[in-house]
Image (cartoon, grey):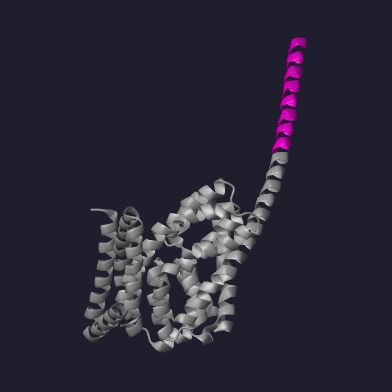
């Protein structure tokens, strides 16, 4: 039995408890699971192929040079910018980052990439402006970019 | 066809096209790409399925509406702490939490708490099994713990900056109003002069 089995058992036990407590809500849970599967799975399919492409066509030296621990501040900035412009769901961010990590990227750049990929989204900008206004959107995205940068430096120090 | 199916098909097609291109470019490289993708998929398949269930369970049993109610009850600085921790456990996309937060803002929640909420939401607790599998336990624990101070810092500095910006905007507004007032005064004076001249001319005509 591997870790995956343990997670699956936990999920099924929780689902069973949910079913005992409230059938209607459990039906809703299954609906969300179905919808999530439909939206996330195809993205993961594409990301896994992209991971294969990057890991076979881009050399370890190249990734280590641009994103490795020697890349320092530049590497963190690249990680942050790519994360901010990447149109990926959080669930797809982790596998891709893991591949980069295996190819020699540093923990700090991966931390920067993951953080901005989830928090700063070019694709969510219009919605954010609509709901909170231009000023809020500008301040939130810029402050987040800056704070993530500082935290990435700290992260490198911690690792 | 429903939008959700269309998008799903699009992503799968993009993936296949990329794979095909690599194959045409070099069959051996294409095979290698397929192998890497297949291995990554097989190794994480069960975790991915489990994570989908965690997302569903958390979204329904700990809906963001429930959490925002908890948040609304707290007052003072404690609100920021709650806003920096609780959203870590929420799933969903930014699109789904924006409408909720904007109604909270209208109801009187502070901007700082909303900023902290969005930041803390990036904790992504239901995805933690996936994060551990691909990035390791140490990375996952550190990132998740660091979310809390990060949310607090972004919340507080963001609010300060926005407040300062608003004050400046008000000042600029006052200056603009003053200028406009001055302009209207000048206009009035010009109008007066013109009417005076006109009446002067009229008087002269009358004299002639």
Residue in the image at 52% along x and 62% along y: B86
Task: Indicate yes or no whether the magenta region holds residue A158.
Answer: no
Residue B159 image-quadrant placement: bottom right
SS assignment for the magenta stretch, majority: helix
Nearer the observer, A156 or B77: B77
Looking at the picture, how far across and down is residue A145, in whole percent? 55, 68
On the rendered structure, is A48 left or right of A159?
A: left
User: Where A32 sits versus B198, above or below?
Assistant: below
On the rendered structure, is B190 left or right of A85?
A: right
Residue in the image at 33% along x and 58% along y: A26
On the rendered structure, is B156 left or right of A49?
A: right
Q: Is residue A64 visible?
A: yes
User: Where B190 sits versus B154, above or below?
Assistant: above
Q: Which residues are magenta?
A: B180-208
Nearer the observer, B54 or B122: B54
Residue A150 image-quadrant placement: bottom right
């Amino acid at each position: 039995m591997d870790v995956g089995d343990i997670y699956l058992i936990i999920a099924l036990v929780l689902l069973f408890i949910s079913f005992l407590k409230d059938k209607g809500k459990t039906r809703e849970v299954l609906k969300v699971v179905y919808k999530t599967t439909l939206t996330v799975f195809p993205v993961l399919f594409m990301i896994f192929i992209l991971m294969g492409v990057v890991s076979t066509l881009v050399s370890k030296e190249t990734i280590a040079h641009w994103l490795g621990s020697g890349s320092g501040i530049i590497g963190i900035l690249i990680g942050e910018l790519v994360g901010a412009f990447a149109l990926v769901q959080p669930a797809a961010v982790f596998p891709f980052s893991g591949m980069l990590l295996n190819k020699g990227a540093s923990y700090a750049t991966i931390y920067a990439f993951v953080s901005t990929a989830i928090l700063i989204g070019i694709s969510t900008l219009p919605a954010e402006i609509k709901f909170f206004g231009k000023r809020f959107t500008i301040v939130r995205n810029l402050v987040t970019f800056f704070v993530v940068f500082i935290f990435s430096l700290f992260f490198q120090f911690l690792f | 066809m429903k939008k959700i199916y269309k998008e799903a098909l699009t992503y799968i097609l993009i993936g296949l096209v990329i794979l095909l291109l690599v194959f045409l470019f070099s069959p051996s490289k294409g095979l290698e790409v397929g192998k890497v993708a297949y291995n990554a998929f097989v190794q994480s398949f069960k975790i991915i399925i489990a994570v989908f269930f965690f997302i569903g369970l958390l979204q329904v049993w700990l809906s963001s509406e429930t959490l925002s109610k908890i948040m609304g009850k707290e007052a003072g600085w404690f609100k920021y702490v709650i806003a920096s921790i609780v959203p870590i456990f929420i799933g969903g996309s930014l699109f789904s939490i924006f409408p909720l937060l904007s109604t909270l803002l209208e109801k009187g929640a502070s901007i700082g708490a909303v900023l902290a909420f969005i930041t803390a939401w990036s904790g992504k607790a239901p995805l933690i099994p996936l994060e551990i599998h691909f990035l390791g336990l140490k990375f996952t624990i550190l990132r998740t713990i660091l979310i809390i101070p990060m949310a607090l810092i972004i919340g507080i500095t963001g609010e300060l900056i926005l407040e300062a910006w608003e004050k400046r905007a008000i000042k600029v507004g006052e200056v603009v109003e003053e200028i406009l007032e001055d302009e209207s005064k000048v206009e009035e004076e010009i109008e007066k002069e013109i009417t005076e001249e006109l009446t002067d001319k009229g008087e002269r005509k009358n004299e002639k």
